[in-house]
Image: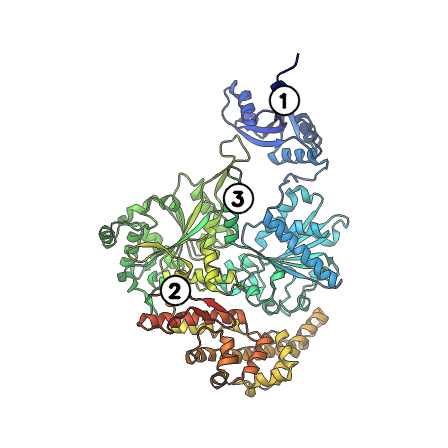
Amino acid sequence: MSKPIEELLPERPDVRLRIYAYSIQDSAHAGWLKVGQTTQDVKARVAQQLQTAAITNFSIEVDELAERADGSVFRDHDVRVRLMAKGFRNPTLEWMECGVADVLTAITELRTGKSLSGTHHETFAMRPEQTQAVEKTYEYFQSIWAESGTAVPRFLWNAKMRFGKTFATYQLAKRLGAKRVLVVTFKPAVQDAWQTDLESHADFDGWQYLSSAAGADPTSAESARPLVYFGSFQDLLGRDRLGNIKAKNEWLHTSNWDLVVFDEYHFGAWRESAKELFEGEDNAVAKKEFAIEYGDGLATFDEELDELGSDEGEFLPITTQAYLYLSGTPFKALATGEFIEEQIFNWTYADEQRAKQMHSAASPGTWNPYASLPEMRLFTYQMPDELVAVANQGEFDEFDLNAFFETTGTAAAAKFKHRDDVQKWLDIIRGSHLPTQIDALKIGSRPPFPYSDTRLLPYMNHSFWFLPNVAACHAMAQLLAEPQNAYWHDYKVLTVAGPGAGIGLDALPPVRHAIGNGHESKTITLSCGKLTTGITVPQWSSILMLRNLKSPETYFQAAFRVQSPWSIKNPHGDDPSQEAILKPVCFVFDFAPTRALRQIAEYGARLSPDEINPEHAVEELVKFLPVLAYDGSHMTQVDAGGILDIAMAGTSASLLARKWESAILVNVDNDTLKKIIGSKAAMEAVMNIEGFRALGSAVFETVVNKSDAVKSAKKEKGESLTPAEKTQLTVEEKDYKSKRKQIQEKLIKFATRIPAFMYLTDFRENTLQDVITKLEPDLFKKVTGLSVEDFNLLVSLGVFNATHMNQAVFAFRRYEDASLSYTGIESHKGLRRYGLFDTVVAADVVLAAQP
């Protein structure tokens, strides 16, 4: 008898064996894990076991497939046997006295067939962007070595925090087959991440990790096993006060490294910006903070860092096959062309947030590896005229935060000079300032102030207030504690400023203690520099920018403190793969709108230095960093064109002129000077620039020859230099540095003539280069003193930086048209395109945004 078709085609069971481990939170099971197996849902199976005993205080710690790549399986008994072989106790039945990492390591060993040292239990793969970084770098290195076997290629990863640079770097080293890896950093505090990643992932089992901080001797490492040696730039590669390589680091000469990694490389461009973070601290404290954050001895190789783009071999006492540079803000290296496009992998904040969106769209309902990284929001507020009048500056009446929060006295005696006005500001941000309330009633809507809008309040439970100085922090703490400010008494106010708050990471424990789990507490952390770099406080969800900051790097270094993830893994205790996101977004609140939008504009441009149109660069950033501006009546979202309009229109003529007085517009490194020396025409052209005839043409050879001679002498003789020779070298060094500065100043003086030429020319839709070379060459020579041929030659040699000239021309022309439009004059009727230095951008959005 034939069977029904349904019986002949039964449904295939989808059964897979899983290993699980759970803990019970009581004294009898402290430090124990129950290791079992099931083909059921793990949560259901554990519930079956524990419900009969009415046990509810349990947590599922491990939930892993018990499968190998060939399809075979292993059992829970195998896991326990493997653990016991490692020395872990089996107190009873299926219980093991071990940790979660130990169970995961045993599972990995059974799955891969490899015996792992320590707890190399992690088996996660690289994310797509990490794979891209490794492959692009590997292919670039191979292409350079194919051309020359002795070449030493260099590559830059421009990757924001939490890209996973340590893990990806080790994967690159493995891809290269590297056996000796030297990791050098400006910030020794990052050592933990480098060690943890190497010692926890199964891919790096058998690798050795040594560090200078632990006093390890790399020459004693096992030659058969790959070695990673970690040290600070200041300790390993810095020189002593006499300019000599430190004797204890002589081994660096004799070791042949396969890969040298410079971590936190942005410090080369960050020296002044980093110092700005600590300006508010007392001088002695600021120096200590700075030294702890970046290490001592930085000044001894400032000059070498300035010349880093030319030749590492000039000052690094090491032999290597390749260099990898890691940074979240390598703006100097990008702007000066130190690395070309094929030598750079970029992973920015916008890339991260785009990946988060794409993963959610492509794989809804699955775990998103980017989900815990919150999206930032920038809210700017125009303060009422009565407050702006208290502390305005410049021709555009910008709200000067440092002046507004100015103080008298110190510590407990610190008081705000404009105490009543600061009190009004406190009332405004919590929505209780009467004039603002009346305005809101007239308009029919309440503006979203930080401490009044119910949508924002959950993100204000733990906030960071960034103030100008120590005294301002103390004055704010005392004002918040006064009786009339009962609203603020619900918050624990932490004054993390001055020597009493502790130096470096010592300032962090009181903050973490006050916050606790972040759910039952409410805190306000007052600081003027401490805890703004290199630390993570997950519960911080908002930052109030209450001080002036000059550079966008510094501004966002502080702002990114609140972008750290806050999530709970395995929130219900029954699924280790689940994650509850507690901070989907985070906020930056700024009360000097023009300054804040200028920071956004500059940051966007610096993230995309090769983007010709600054508006496109800013547009890319604000897709994922929405900017909302309160103008005194309405809160509206500002697009890229609006940001540039406000940023440019809010600048003064003197600030704009500084763009043309910037050293970044000209190049005076040895390579460029040698190009000038090697070209008779170039030398004659330079001599036509005002001031150079007085210096004389020999100044170029003096700078190059003396700098080369000093470096060569230090490198060759080292410790054998006599006191007289050291004194002579110091004199020579001061001389060539002074002359290099003079060359730079003369070239900058020439650059400042270009705005005058732009005022006089009438060709707005052409590139400035075309206007100079084709349309008004005679006018250019009259204004600048340089012929078109001369100027072209110097541009081709890299004496002038075209990328930054583009940005300066864009700012100038936008400012000029905005100022004319303000008076009712259209500068050039029907203007549809803006000519920059060597390119043209569309003006449609620009014109639409103007009044």
Q: Tell me how far mark 2 sits from mark 3, CA to CA.
A: 34 Å
Q: Residue at x 54, y 24 (%)?
A: 44
- In this image, 406 relative to 576: left or right? left
Q: Which residue is mark 2?
A: 645
> Which callout, 2 or 3, points at the residue further toward the start of the chain?
3
Identify residue type, mark 3: His
Query: Between residues 114 and 648, which one lies in front from this camera angle?
Result: 648
Query: Between residues 689 and 506, which one lies in front from this camera angle?
Result: 689
* Label 3 residue SS: helix
**Closer to us: mark 3 or mark 1?**
1
Marker disc for residue 524: none
Q: Which residue is mark 1?
A: 9
Query: Between residues 276 and 504, which one lies in front from this camera angle?
Result: 276
> Which callout, 2 or 1, points at the residue further toward the start of the chain?
1
Residue furthest out toward the bottom: 694
Residue 317 in the image: x percent, y percent? 70, 64
* Label 2 residue SS: helix
**Closer to us: mark 2 or mark 1?**
1
